[in-house]
Amino acid sequence: MKIGIVCPYAWDVPGGVQFHIRDLAEHLIRLGHDVSVLAPADDETPLPPYVVPAGRAVPVPYNGSVARLNFGFLSAARVRRWLQNGAFDVIHIHEPASPSLGLLACWAAQGPIVATFHTSNPRSRAMIAAYPILQPALEKISARIAVSEYARRTLVEHLGGDAVVIPNGVDVDFFARAEPEPAWQGRTIGFIGRIDEPRKGLPVLMKALPAILAAVPDARLLVAGRGDQDEAVAGLPAELRSRVEFLGMVSDEDKARLLRSVDVYVAPNTGGESFGIILVEAMSAGAPVLASDLDAFAQVLDQGEAGELFTNENADALAATAIRLLNAPDRLAELGERGAKHVRRFDWSTVGADILAGPVPRPLPHLRPRATPPPPAPQVPASLRARPR
């Protein structure tokens, strides 16, 4: 089968959606399908052979973060050319409601369209306001997938229609067979994420760190991700800053080794998460997980059965739980074992089969956004009309 997949976000900027699309494409290729991925990227960007660049991405504030999107006349022309050259049996569009390649592809595509919705944003006025623009495109979608119940709820409440929930997938064995790095072992706390994106929660972890280090003097924090390292530790007492080791951007292999090495992985994210792929990766590696009690995280962790939860944005609660875990090796071992068993439901062998089976209902006409979208249709922001190089 010839499958075209549309990625809405810049391919060269790591993120959960890009990782999901990459892993899905490679899973489908291993099964013998002919897969092409269209993604925002400069023509000079090194890309896997199955990825087609659609031009430079433009940074735009989106859902509490900065998304790098691609929108404009040149982008639309590249989308049409990719569709014509591909002659795909099915198009799989990710985030068709975002102002990027997904929406352009939805407008231009003919034939079967599958859409996956990743965003969890229960109070998005922008999404409701954009409904008149989005409606004609969304009505072309044949099948809808949401990566979590919270992404499904956002779709139902803001855009109408429904979707079947199929979670993000992970190659569980890739993380499970990684070799620990001795230099990263020994009373270590792990964090992976963009350092300078507040909703990833590193400031909450930094606020909790002095109490953790006071109670567990030989503990240390390993941080992997891009961002301003000096700014990240600015709030720590000077004598504690050496207890934080910044690893910068890490490869997939080193990420797996890091997760195999740490005593506990902390996910202090404060909001805007519809799933939590890093939790699944950590459990795959056997790392005990401590996460904020976001609804999406609680669902991934089986309501606390497969990992510990603490009150969101509460540094004291994070510190107390981390101290308890670091001083309880039996509990850490139990969490690691529970997580390793629970995570099998997210392996690509299961998730990929569910996506290929396609048990997704068509949009239900009686489901509409709760708020009436205001006419006239909003104009596309000038920043999104920038022509890619």
Image (cartoon, rainbow, N blue to C red):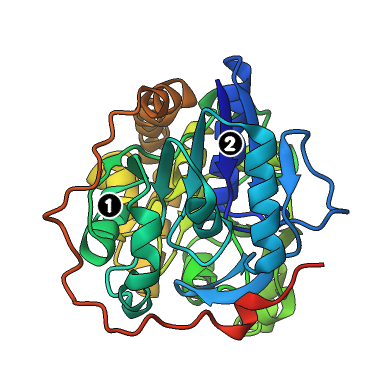
For image coordinates 75% across by 59% down, the residue present is 55
Instruction: Report whether 379 appears left or right of 305.
Output: right
Instruction: Report whether 295 appears left or right of 78.
Output: left
* Displayed quadrant of residue 52: top right
Mark 1 element type: helix
**Gap between marks 2 and 1, in whole Å?**
23 Å
* Displayed quadrant of residue 71: bottom right
Which residue was labeled with disc 2?
4
The circle drawn on residue 218 is none
Q: Which of the two labelled residues, at mark 2 and mark 1, occupies the earlier sequence position?
A: 2
- Closer-to-camera residue (341/50): 50
For image coordinates 70% across by 53% down, the residue present is 78
- Closer-to-camera residue (191/346): 346
Spot occupied by residue 63 in the image (x, y as percentages of width and height): 45, 71
Can residue 225 be seen in this snapshot?
no
Taking the view exactly as shown, the residue that stands out farthest to the left is: 366
Q: How many marks?
A: 2
What's the amino acid at mark 2? Answer: Gly
What's the amino acid at mark 1? Answer: Arg
Can residue 305 be seen in this snapshot?
yes
Q: Residues within 10 Å of mark 1 (few under 14, many from 20)?
A: many
Q: Nearer the viewer, mark 2 or mark 1?
A: 2
Question: On screen, 261 above or below 96?
Answer: above
Spot occupied by residue 19 in the image (x, y as percentages of width and height): 59, 44
Which residue was labeled with disc 1?
152
Instruction: Report whether 31 appears left or right of 138.
Output: right
Quadrant of the snapshot with the C terminus: bottom right
Question: On screen, 369 above or below 280?
Answer: below
Spot occupied by residue 238 in the image (x, y as percentages of width and height): 69, 82
Quadrant of the snapshot with the N terminus: top right
